Image (cartoon, grey):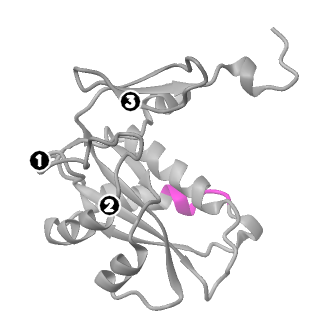
């Protein structure tokens, strides 16, 4: 069952924008992050939730989508995220969030998948612009934006060929994600 969640937890970049996420859906995701491990138990991560169309329209242009897909500018109207979670570090609590950001995001995305949604972690964010839009105080630093919604694209995992790690889309808009083989990851692999 857990393996199924991992397999369904892909970086989705196109969504059915009509399918909304409720406040409860988003707070359940943050609760999963809240219950996750935290370096030194500092718990310095905070979040801004958006499932309102007006705020989503302000967030969307601050994001860059799919760097390997040079001929794609990102999701069009109708396939844009229905919600966002903006992950912040509260520097008043700690300047070092260690690896808490990744642990929390994995918990958020696995909860999203369990609820029938999907997401994409976006690190390529116009952080100064988004901070101004959100009127953030200086102590709250934007780390990532998680785009969320009901996926409307197919993502498949395949073995890496010719050492090429770049994801790509085929003529049917199926998103292909090359992954290294298990024996390539474990240094002392035993078959």
Q: Quadrant of residue 176?
A: top left
Give the labeled residue for mark 2. Answer: 84
Percent x, y of residue 77? 11, 51
Q: Which residue is outermost to the right?
A: 188
Residue 66 on the magenta span: no
Look at 56% across and 20% down and name the residue there: 160
Q: Position of residue 106 (x, y in %)?
A: 53, 48
Along the line of sight, the residue nearer the viewer: 176 or 162? 162
Residue 78: mark: 1
Left or right of 83 on screen, residue 88:
right
Q: Residue 122's quadrant in the figure?
A: bottom left
Task: Return the mark for residue 116.
Answer: none
CA gap between label 3 and label 2 equals 24 Å
- SS for tag 1? loop
Q: Which residue corresponds to mark 3?
A: 168
Highlighted magenta segment, given as a residue range: 32-37
Disc nearest the viewer among 1 and 3: 3
CB contact under 8 Å: marks 1 and 2: no
CA distance for labels 1 and 2: 15 Å
* Residue lying at the far top of the rendered structure: 191
Tell which circle, 1 or 2, labels the residue nearer the N-terminal end: 1
């Amino acid at each position: 069952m857990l393996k199924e969640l991992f397999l369904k937890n892909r970086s989705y970049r196109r969504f059915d924008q009509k399918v909304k996420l409720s406040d409860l859906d988003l707070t359940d995701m943050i609760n999963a992050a809240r219950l996750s491990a935290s370096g030194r138990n500092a718990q310095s991560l905070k979040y801004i939730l958006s499932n309102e169309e007006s705020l989503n329209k302000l967030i969307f242009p601050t994001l860059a989508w799919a760097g390997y897909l040079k001929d794609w500018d990102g999701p069009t109207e109708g396939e844009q995220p229905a919600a966002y979670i903006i992950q912040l570090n509260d520097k008043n609590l700690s300047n070092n969030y260690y690896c808490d950001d990744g642990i929390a995001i994995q918990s958020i995305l696995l909860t999203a998948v369990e609820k029938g949604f999907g997401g994409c972690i976006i690190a390529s964010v116009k952080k100064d612009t988004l901070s101004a839009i959100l009127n953030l105080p200086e102590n709250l630093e934007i780390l990532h934006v998680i785009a969320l919604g009901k996926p409307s694209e197919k993502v498949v995992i395949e073995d890496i060929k010719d050492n090429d790690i770049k994801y790509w889309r085929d003529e049917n808009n199926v998103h292909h994600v090359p992954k290294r083989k298990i024996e390539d990851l474990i240094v002392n692999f035993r078959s």
